[in-house]
Amino acid sequence: MLKVSQIFIYPIKSLAGIALDESAVTERGLQYDRRWVLVDESHYHITQREFAEMALIDVKIGENGLILNHRTKDFGECLVSFEPKTADNQLVGIWDDEVLAIRVADEVDAWFQQVLGIKCYLFYQPDVSIRPVDKKYAIDNEHVNLADGYPILIAGEASIEDLSSKIGKETDIRRFRPNIVFVGGEAFEEDNFKEFTINGVVLHGVKNCARCPIPNIDPDTAEISKETIKTLSSYRTRNNKVFFGQNVLVRTTGTIKVGDEIRIA
């Protein structure tokens, strides 16, 4: 039997994630997941690929918005309200896509610029901003938030255990920034997921996830070591890409919880 063992959201793209016991599932993915993004002066997204320290910015969901703190340095607390305080609408770059977004607030930008030491701005994707998934993998014109390409990423604990055994030490699955983690089954069983349900929510796996260097960054310390991707590439490479996890589309909405059974159609 396959069961959900962990649920994660990443409200601000490439900042630290939040572990949840349950989450609403919207057509874009898990509620709050990757609805905010930091961009540079050219309005192109920035991530841990360029600034590993982003992993050290913790995020909490408060009553009125997100609450941010740097894990190791005292920059004070930053509140990101759910409703942007500006009317600054811009197209922001997420890979090859241009996405309509709203700049959140001057004081939020100032906080991030102090923390990261660069000119950067926080934007929010409103509900009216539609970003279609890659047409090659869409089933019914699905769309996505500010994630790299798909609404949800799922991965199995057996898969990270397999990788850990090859590295020779325990490896944290948080390096791969999944939304749903499950127990049961064989290593990399998620590679073959097509239609499946969790608590009545219908999901559909469409594409194995090709990995960038971010899994080389320790999510607790932001230290960089190449062993994670180097080891994974030794046995999970196809067409010069390294794969871990399965990209998933949302077919019906609802709520999922840790402990829910995953039923394969």
Image: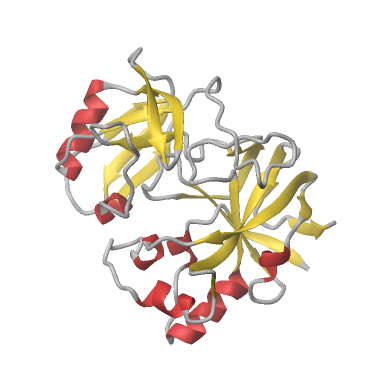
Q: Image quadrant for the C terminus?
A: bottom right
Task: Using the image, determine if residue 249 lies above or below residue 207.
Answer: above
The way the protein has been coloured in the rendering is secondary structure
Nearest the viewer among 15 and 148 is 148
- Number of dots carrying numbers: 0
Determine the residue located farthest toward the top in the rendered image: 87
* Residue nearest the viewer, comparing 260 with 218: 218
Residue at image coords 59%, 34%: 132
Q: Position of residue 143 (x, y in %)?
A: 61, 34
Closer to the camera, 19 or 219?
A: 219
Q: Residue furthest right?
A: 265
71 up-or-down from 84: above or below: below
Residue 23, given in percent of the width and then of the height, sits at 61, 42
Residue for point 42% across, 19% down: 83
Q: Is residue 6 left or right of residue 148?
A: right
In the shown orientation, is residue 171 left or right of residue 182?
left
Q: Is residue 88 left or right of residue 107?
A: right
Residue 18 can be seen in this image: yes
Task: Return the x and y of residue 152 as percentages of the image width and height.
Answer: 60, 48
Quarter holding residue 98 = top left
Query: As displayed, is residue 126 above or below residue 75?
Result: above
Q: Is residue 117 above or below residue 262?
A: above
Of the 4 image quadrants, the one containing the N terminus is bottom right
Name the residue rendered at 69%, 76% in the picture: 186
Q: Which residue is painted at 28% across and 61% down in the image? A: 222
Within the image, what quadrant is residue 263 found in?
A: bottom right
| Residue 153 position in % (x across, y down) | 58, 53
- Is residue 63 something that shows in the picture? no
